Amino acid sequence: MTEPAPLAELTPVPRKTSPVLEQLERCRPFLEPVLEATPWEELSRQVASGHAQLWPGESAAMVTRVIGDTLEVWLGGGDLKELLQLQDGVAAFGRSMGCSRATIEGRAGWGRVLKTNGWAASFVTYERPL
């Protein structure tokens, strides 16, 4: 029977990085500024597990989640024109997942842009620090 190698001689098996996580990291400059309360590691876990979907562009990115019959546009950052170009493909994905509507939460300024693209306000969220 042979002796096991000393720990100093062992090297870890290289961990393969998934292509989606590589894309997520490439899109970090677009998404990290809009994360607010969500840590980057949590976003990475959500995307890696398939609970969130990454829609990368060249200079923008969007992240969605399917919640029941709703496609939630969770995050979007980067070039506005490119974000708007992503919405048809994202909508087709939502329909293929059985979603009957899409939602976005954002600052009031988004309303002006979204209204011209078929979106309508359905509720307003107010907050205050505690």
Image: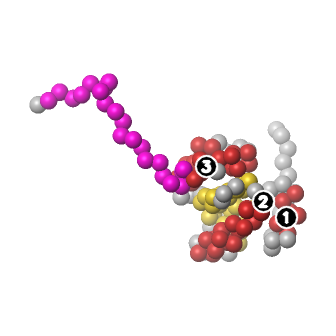
Residue at 73% from the left image edge and 62% from the top image edge: 82
Q: Is residue 3 above or below residue 62?
A: above
Outermost residue to the front = 58
Mark 1 closeness class: few <14, some 14–19, many ≥20 residues within 10 Å: few
Identify the amino acid type marked 3.
Arg
State which tag comes first along the sequence, 3 or 1: 3
Mark 1 or mark 2, earlier in chain: 2
Cβ atoms at labels 3 and 1 below 8 Å apart:
no
SS state under label 1: helix
Q: Nearer the viewer, residue 6 or 85?
A: 85
* Magenta span of residues: 2-22
- Indicate whether residue 6 is drawn in magenta: yes
Looking at the image, do the residues carrying marks 1 and 2 touch, with CB atoms under 8 Å apart? yes
**Residue 17 visible in rendering:** yes
Disc 3, SS? helix
At horizontal 66% and vertical 57% (from top left) the residue drawn is: 58
- Judging by the rendered image, the residue that carries numbered circle 1 is 113
Q: Which residue is mark 3?
A: 26
